[in-house]
Amino acid sequence: MFQKNRSCKRIKHFQQLKYDQRQLDYFKQKNKFAYLIQYKTKKFKIKTKKAIIIIIKFIVYKLCMNLLFQMTFKQMIYKRLLVDMNIILIVIVQHFLIVLLWILLVYNRIKIDINGFFRNF
C-alpha cells in the first residue's frame, strides 16, 4: 500500500516536471523569436541611422567645398575666414539634419511600435 502510493507520487512528480520543461521550452522559443526580431530591427535602425548621417555629412561637406572652390582671386584673401564660416555652417546644418532624422525615426517608431507589438504575444 505504502509502496504503491509512493510510486504514484513519483509518476505524478515526473509528469509535472515534463510539463514544466515543455512549458519552459515553449516560452524560451517564443521569447527567443521575439528577441531576435527585436534585436535585428534595433540593429537595422542603428545601421540605417548611421548610414543616413554619413550621407548627410558627405552631401553637406561637398556642397560647402563647391562653394569654397567657386571663389574669385579677390575672395582668396578672405579664404581663412570663409573656411571657418563654412566649417561652422557644416556643423550647424549637420546637427539640424541629424535632429530632423532623429525626429523622423522616433515618429516612425511610435507609429509602428515593433517592440510593443512583440511583447504582447
Image (spheres, rainbow, N blue to C red):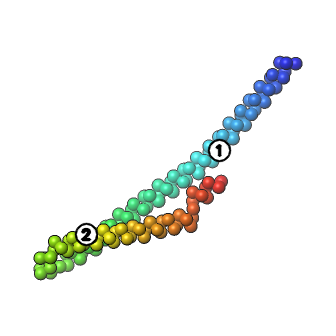
Q: Residue furthest right?
A: 1
Label 2: state its secondary structure.
helix
Residue located at (72% from left, 37% from top):
19
Residue 46's tag is none
Q: Which residue is mark 2?
A: 87
In this rendering, the answer to whether 24 lies above or below 112 is: above
Picture coordinates of residue 84 (x, y %)?
21, 70
Q: Which residue is mark 1?
A: 27
Seen in the picture, residue 17 relative to 31 is either above or below; the reply is above
Lower position in the chain sequence, tag 2 or tag 1: 1
* Amino acid, disc 2: Ile
Q: Looking at the image, can residue 56 be seen? A: no
- What residue sits 38% from the left and 70% below the top? 97
Q: Looking at the rendering, in which quadrant would you find the C terminus?
A: bottom right
Q: Is residue 3 left or right of residue 79?
A: right
> What residue type is disc 1 on?
Phe
Q: Give coordinates of residue 9: x percent, y percent.
A: 80, 26
